[in-house]
Amino acid sequence: MNKHYKLLEIKDSVLGYISVSIDYYRLDDYIEDLEAELEKLHYKGSFALDFLLSNGLKGERYFHAYFDGKKILLSTIYHMDHVTLEVSSVASEFYKKSHNLISQSCIISKPQRFLIKKGFIKI
């Protein structure tokens, strides 16, 4: 089984975790795996989803969702217009350290890849 995301803990007042994409797959391709991992962590609450590798730097990249302890409630998934500094910092640090994921993306331009790698832009 290939994992299509990485679940990272964040110290945010509202969101406990962020699921960052590690390939171009959509949430519906791995939602059951994500639910199982959140359940194993005994987590219940809101979390963020970062679809950088499938949606790019602009547009609908960050989403909010709620996990009830067993399932992600699909009715709670929405695009996040404003992302906290903590959420963007955790995602930026992950992608800076995992530059190989960025370098394989067809959606992120070469100049953007360079800036991400060097840490010049927070993503």
Image: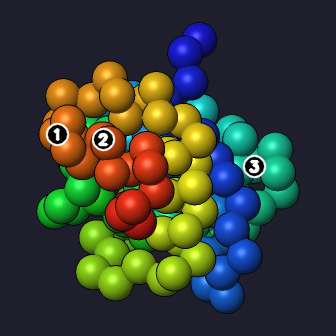
Relative placement, left or right, of 60 versus 103 is: left
Q: Residue at x 43, y 44 (%)?
A: 117
Q: Amino acid at mark 1?
A: Ser
Q: Earlier in the sequence, mark 2 or mark 3?
A: 3
With respect to residue 8, does 30 lie above or below? above
Say what secondary structure mark 2 lies in. helix
Say what secondary structure mark 1 lies in. loop
Quarter of the picture holding the C terminus: bottom left
Q: Amino acid at mark 2?
A: Arg
What is the x, y in percent for residue 82? 34, 84
What is the x, y in percent for residue 38? 70, 50
Report the Cα–Cα distance between label 2 and label 3. Answer: 34 Å
Marker disc for residue 81: none
Marker disc for residue 39: 3
With respect to residue 97, does 18 lie above or below? below
Q: Amino acid at mark 3?
A: Glu
Marker disc for residue 109: 1
Residue carrying label 2: 113
